[in-house]
Amino acid sequence: MKQTALETIALTKQFRDFWQRITVTAVKEVSFQVATGTVFGLLGPNGSGKTTTLRLMTGLLHPSSGCIRILGDSPTSLQTRRRIGYLPETDGFYEFLSGRDNLRFYAGLFGYSGREASRRADTLLDTVGLIRDAHRPVGEFSKGMKRRIGLAQALLNDPELLILDEPTAGLDPAGCRQVKELLRQRAQSGRTVVVSSHLLADIEDLCESVCILHQGRVVAQGRLAEMLEQREQHRFTTGVLTTAQCESLQESFLSITGSAALMDHPHRALESYFTQVVEQVGQPSS
Amino acid sequence: MLLIPIPEHGRLRDMIFLFIRLALIHARVLLRNPVCLLLSLATALLTLLLPLAFAHTFGNTAARLAQDGGLAFQFVAGIVFAAYAACAITGSARASGTEALTLAKPVSPTLLFLARYAGIAGGLALFCVTTATATLLAMRIAEAFSPATGYCIDFTTATIAVASAILACLLGALLNRFRNASFHASVFVLLPLLLIVTAGSSGFYNRLGAWQSPPAYTLDVAILTAALRIGLALLMFAALTQVLALLLKPVSVGAAGLLILALGLTLPGISPAGSSPLRWLSMAIVPDWQAFWTTSASGLVPPPMPGALWLYAFCYITAILILGVHLFNRSEHA
């Protein structure tokens, strides 16, 4: 039985105007648990309350009611913040500072010495593929580069819980793949990752369990494999068959089940095909 | 509940380093702001050129008019500087997301708020050094009588002082071109340094520009205490606007700041004189700006005054910052 890294209980967030009238209820009675060492996905259309939920998790917003336990503590506790990493929707960098200096600054907020901050900054810049651009001001970075360096800052303290708001937004397919691989590795090493996205393919690739939000409410949650499994059907996958073999199988299916089976060639994911093509073009001809 | 938790043993040093780190980054953001440089440069140049524009002295000495003009420029431009700095720093930290990202790290909101004030105060201090030095030089430039030179304006000092401002801009451009340093921040720092060098070198020549050795200084440094008191009033106003910036939009901060400024200037006139409780109450809510403007009577103030003023400013700033910390801790940072 895995331990719980994050738990929300009847979490509600209402935004109010100057006169304290409720303008919008962004999150309504949201309850879910995230097991340690898993990748958890928050899914939902625009305005469904994903970002608000993540901000509540990081203590940047205060819940109107309900509660959140992160690693057994309150999200506003400084001890908790020492153990989490957060990638916000907006970048949050000083645009005049270089990528390396930004990372050094944020590493310094954890109390790391100058040397340790530099070491971590350089390692992470290498991890996210920005070591060549380390000395360029962040203001000159493209959207994808900002996302990468944002991920690097979220990893500065090697967090036990990583909270990511749209981590692959603006990234090219190769970047997406890198990020997803990095997050998988973290989960395998016992770290917990919470990802919010409306990119369904990313969530499907990454997450073990998901929570689907709509208009601030949880409309579905559970293990992704169980949610997507179609238990009323079976699928067989074999090597390539001849036409005669196919016809023979169809006849057998018809005689056993009373109906014909659907038979076609499986499709691979576009991301996998794209990556293969780009890698082939990038390789020098022998 | 304590607003500032007492740190564990050994954590105090980390907290101080963290405070310095945060204050420095806010000061850097401020110094890079072109509006702040524009205010500093314009105030310095206006102050330096003011003595050249006097047509009538209305019975006062030109130096006295230059002094009052320079201090008035420092106060008025300083008020704008303080309000703008508070709004710009608070607004940019929110808009860029640096505030949220910083608070998602193990940084207490109390520390961030106070460090932000320290950053603004640092920029304001540099602004005050620039304007105070410019006032000092303007008093030397103003027409005066000496047995050796008779009545004359010190065009040599005026030329060197204006040239030093231009030189600061040129050096800033060179640093930007060859070291990628920020032009605005470089000029903001170089300007007071070069003006101080100008003031330091002014003892080596007389009002007609003739070399004199040993150096004989004619700068009225007593005016620096008056400039310091205005700086203190500006620090109070900066604290006030930083708290207002948490609650209001920039335009509203400006309007509220102006209202408080006007109230502070008029309340002493309509509240009971002396040290009645009502007067103290009004001074506790709205700063008594008049108390900081004590340059009449040859620029010197009675000895007990500065101590009481320091205490008043310290108490007022502390109270306002505690209120600000309370509001900042309660506010959301998304």
Image (cartoon, rainbow, N blue to C red):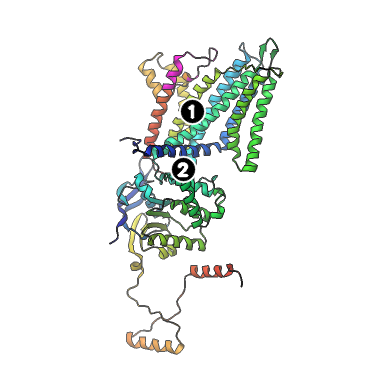
Whether residue B79 appears in this view of the structure is yes
Q: What element carries label 1?
A: helix
Q: How crowded is mark 1: few (under 14 residues within 10 Å), some or many (20 or more)?
A: some
The front one of B208 and A257 is: B208
Q: Does the magenta stretch include residue B297?
A: yes
Crowd rating for badge 2 (residues with CA inside 10 Å; few <14, some 14–19, many 20+): some
Point out the stretch of residues depicted in magenta: B292-311
Label 2 sits on a secondary structure element that is helix
**Residue with the mark numbered 2:** B94
> Residue B20: x percent and y percent?
46, 37
The residue type indicated by label 2 comes to: Arg
Tell me what residue is drawn at x 38 percent, y 32 percent.
B323
B20 left or right of A22 in image: right
Of A103 and B69, nearer the camera is: A103
Q: Nearer the viewer, mark 2 or mark 1?
A: 2
Q: Is residue A25 visible?
A: no
Which chain does the numbered disc 2 sit on? Answer: B
Lower sequence index among marks 2 and 1:
2
Q: Mark 1 points at which residue?
A: B258
Badge 1 amino acid: Leu
Give the percent coordinates (x, y) of residue A105: 48, 45
Q: In which quarter of the image is residue B172?
A: top right
Would you say B296 lies left or right of A68 here? Answer: right
Q: Does the magenta stretch include residue B40?
A: no
Name the residue rendered at 50%, 40% in the picture.
B25
Q: In which quarter of the image is residue B199?
A: top right
**Would residue B142 appear left or right of A180 to someone viewing this image?**
right
